[in-house]
Image (cartoon, helix red, strand yellow):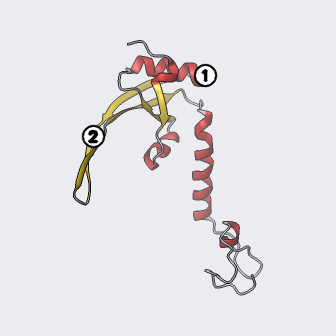
Amino acid sequence: MSLHPNEVLLAPVVSEKSYSLIEEGKYVFRIHPDAHRTQVRQAVEELFGVHVEGVNVLKVQPKPKRRGLSKGIKPGWKKAIVQLREGETIEIFEGARAITRRAAASSVAPGPTGPSAPCVLASLGARTPGIHLCRREDH
């Protein structure tokens, strides 16, 4: 079946495992059920302007789900793990890498503490008058 490159790649897969693979130069995409690895390779090379070294294609099995007495099935889908040439990246995933690097850096080196340190809750926009979830008294 002949598919346009925009039809082959449906969406990037957003999961903890897929983001850990980015460090190895591997990117995970949800793909069209009829697409094969050659089409995936050509689509990634054409859409993102990178060189693909390898493509692994696999089917995610449908899973039975239940909510109370009602039963259903979560549909299966097809995904591809694409290995890029050393040193090449795909730009749409770069924001996720920056977030994971920032989270790793913040867990290794904690921020400043004491009365002059900024409140974490205030920086997250959780400032509500009369409600303070931290133990600091100066804000």
- Residue, disc 2: 62
Q: What element carries label 2?
A: loop
Q: Is residue 71 left or right of residue 48?
A: left
- Residue 43 locus on image (x, y percent): 51, 20
Residue placed farthest to the top in the image?
2
Q: In this view, does 37 lie to the left or right of 107?
A: left
- Residue, disc 1: 49
Instruction: Determine the image quadrant of residue 75.
Output: top left
Q: Is residue 134 above or below residue 2?
A: below
Q: Which residue is drawn at 51% across and 40% down?
A: 22
Work out whether residue 101 or residue 69 is closer to the camera in this orientation and state it.
69
Q: Is residue 16 left or right of residue 119?
A: left
Q: Which amino acid does label 2 sit on?
A: Pro
Work out whether residue 15 or residue 53 is closer to the camera in this orientation and state it.
15
Q: In this view, does 20 lie to the left or right of 123?
A: left
- Residue 47 locus on image (x, y percent): 58, 22
Q: Which residue is drawn at 48% across and 27% down?
A: 9
Q: In which quarter of the image is the C terminus?
A: bottom right
Q: Which of marks 2 and 1 is nearer the N terminus?
A: 1
- Residue 108 locus on image (x, y percent): 59, 64
Q: Is residue 135 above or below residue 88?
A: below
Residue placed farthest to the front in the image?
70
Q: Is mark 1 on a helix, strand or loop?
A: loop
Q: In this view, does 122 lie above or below 99?
A: below
